[in-house]
Amino acid sequence: MTPSRVQPAPDAESWRTFLQLWASQALSVLGSGLSGFALNIYLTQTMFPLESQRAQLAGALSMTALGWTVAAIVGGPWPGRWRTAGTAGA
């Protein structure tokens, strides 16, 4: 039986860095959600307020959701790509 390696406890600086990154990501997600909600309200109340415009409203809301989804799918892998590209020479 081989002895297992004990991982050292993270120091206070790495914990502080983690909390800063976590908090900034939480604010980013909150801001994105609020922006999406505000855009939906704007479309519903301002751009297509009439009952006869419900079909156009449905199309606009669908395109908005599709845009947010495509942006998340396409943009999702980029941070990991930049991270691996930045450490390739190290």
Image: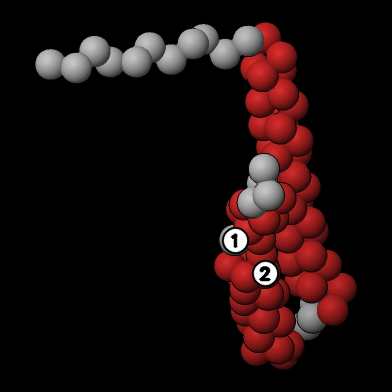
| Label 1, residues with CA under 10 Å away: few <14, some 14-19, many ≥20 | few
Q: Is residue 21 above or below residue 69?
A: above
Percent of width and height locating residue 73: 58, 67
Residue 8 in the figure: left or right of residue 5:
right
Distance (Cα) linking label 2 and label 1: 11 Å
Q: Is residue 76 above or below residue 49?
A: above
The residue that mark 1 highlights is 77
Task: Point out the image quarter for the N terminus.
Answer: top left
Percent of width and height locating residue 21: 71, 32
Q: Earlier in the sequence, mark 2 or mark 1?
A: 2
Q: Residue at x 43, y 15 (%)?
A: 7
Task: Point out the image quarter for the C terminus.
Answer: top right
The residue that mark 2 highlights is 71
Which structural element holds mark 2? helix
Of residues 28 and 79, the one nearer the viewer is 79
Image quadrant assignment for residue 27: top right
Q: Is residue 16 above or below residue 50?
A: above
Q: Is residue 74 above or below residue 21?
A: below
Percent of width and height locating residue 5: 34, 15
